[in-house]
Amino acid sequence: MRYLAYGSNLHPARLRARSPSARLLGKAVVAGHALRFHKRSIIDGSGKCSIAKADDSIHVAVYELSNSDGVLLDEAEGLGIGYRHQTIAVAEFGECITYVATETHVDDSLRPYTWYKELVLLGCASLQFPQDYIDSIETVASQEDPDRQRHEENMQIVHRMSNSKTDLI
């Protein structure tokens, strides 16, 4: 299956930890959508990424996943509990599956935790997205995770990813 990543799963090391068969096919720009941090997490209530229809464009990564790893990713993402599948046609890659927040889990007042925003930014940097796109994500207000253990565990993931020498494209 072809998977379109736009948020915390952008970085190859992050996605391979969740879906070992993930193979980066390339990157693309998808018009008519905007990146938002307005999906309420079912675990901690913070803002997670989703995409919304807009007069804007998002930068994405397209991966090939085995069907069994697609099921694992569905579980990790909470398919059916805040996210739903959406198929998006990407000119260079064809039809791709991604996750979009369900209306019941959208709240524009949410902010991401700092570690989550860092995961997104690391993915953008690793794929060499344009600096103005990265800058727009850096301006998103974030908040500290009140669960210090979760914060530390995720910052360790951020640190490992930032030191990853993963071959990209």
Image (spheres, rainbow, N blue to C red):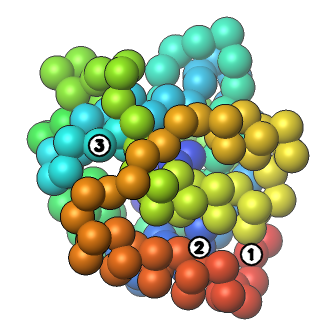
> Do the residues under discs 2 and 1 have CB atoms within 8 angstroms?
yes
| Above-or-below relation of 23 to 166 | above
Q: Is residue 112 left or right of residue 72?
A: right
Q: Earlier in the sequence, mark 3 or mark 2?
A: 2
Q: Disc 3 designates what residue?
A: 46
Residue 109, numbered circle: none
Q: Position of residue 5 (x, y in %)?
A: 53, 51
Badge 2 crowding class, 10 Å Cα cut-off, few under 14, some 14 to 19, many 20 or more, is: many
Towards the viewer: 101 or 158: 158
Circle 1: is it few (<14), some (14-19), or many (20+) Cα within 10 Å?
Answer: some
Q: Which residue is mark 2?
A: 12
Whether residue 67 is visible, yes or no, is: no
The residue tagged 1 is 168
Compared across the picture, whether 131 is left or right of 80 comes to: right
Q: Are marks 3 and 2 in contact (CB under 8 Å)?
A: no
Task: Give the secondary structure at mark 1.
Answer: loop
Marked residue nearer the N-terminal end (2 or 1): 2
Q: Residue at x 16, y 53 (%)?
A: 43
Observer-side mark, 1 or 3, equals 3
Q: Position of residue 145 (x, y in %)?
A: 32, 57
Instruction: Inspect the image, locate mark 2, and give the three-letter code of the amino acid beneath it.
Output: Pro
Spatial CA span between label 2 and label 1: 7 Å
Q: Residue at x 70, y 56 (%)?
A: 124
Q: Residue at x 56, y 46 (%)?
A: 6
Residue 1 percent coordinates (x, y)? 43, 58
